[in-house]
Image: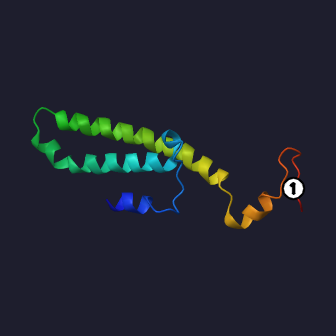
């Protein structure tokens, strides 16, 4: 619950309109899968049919794919969002002529 509450703050950058390629939503989904995966950990050793073990493996594979997606989207978001001290300078640039003031 704390993870979701921290992520719901207005200062957190997330792509609401593009939630399927959002670094924030990939991270929340991966964290929830990992928490659920840890929650079923005691049941893995009590189950003789290995059903919980297979669920645990599948959830970790999905979380791995989400973490790989986070690597791509995190890099994209870091390069897309200008730092606050660069923002005023970057908005003076003319991107059609590829010219920036000195």
**What is the x, y in percent for residue 69?**
50, 41
User: Position of 37 compared to 51: left or right?
Assistant: right
Q: Quadrant of the N terminus?
A: bottom left
Residue under the image location 17 percent in, 33 percent down: 51
48 vs 20, left or right, is left
- Is residue 9 or residue 41 the one in the foreground? 9
Task: Indicate the position of residue 22 as horizontal and vertical percent values.
Answer: 51, 45
- In the rendered structure, the answer to whether residue 19 lies left or right of residue 37 reads right
Rendered residue at 22%/50% (across/down): 39
Q: In the current view of this chain or complex, which residue is farthest to the bottom?
A: 85
Could you say where residue 2 lies in the image, as x and y percent from the top left?
34, 62
Q: Tell me: residue 87, above or below residue 20.
A: below
Label 1 sits on residue:
100
Mark 1 secondary-structure assignment = loop
- For disc 1, the neighbor class at 10 Å (few under 14, some 14 to 19, many from 20) is few
Q: Position of residue 65 (x, y in %)?
A: 43, 38
Residue at 78% in and 58% down? 90
- What residue sits 24% from the left and 34% below the top? 54
């Amino acid at each position: 619950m704390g993870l979701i509450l921290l992520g719901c703050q207005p200062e957190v950058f997330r792509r609401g309109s593009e939630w399927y390629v959002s670094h924030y939503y990939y991270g929340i989904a991966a964290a929830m899968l990992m928490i659920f995966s840890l929650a079923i950990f005691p049941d893995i050793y009590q189950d003789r049919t290995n059903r919980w073990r297979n669920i645990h493996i599948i959830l970790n594979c999905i979380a791995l794919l989400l973490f790989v997606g986070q690597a791509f989207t995190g890099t994209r978001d870091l390069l897309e969002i200008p730092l606050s001290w660069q923002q005023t300078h970057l908005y003076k640039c003319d991107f059609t002529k590829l010219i920036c003031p000195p």
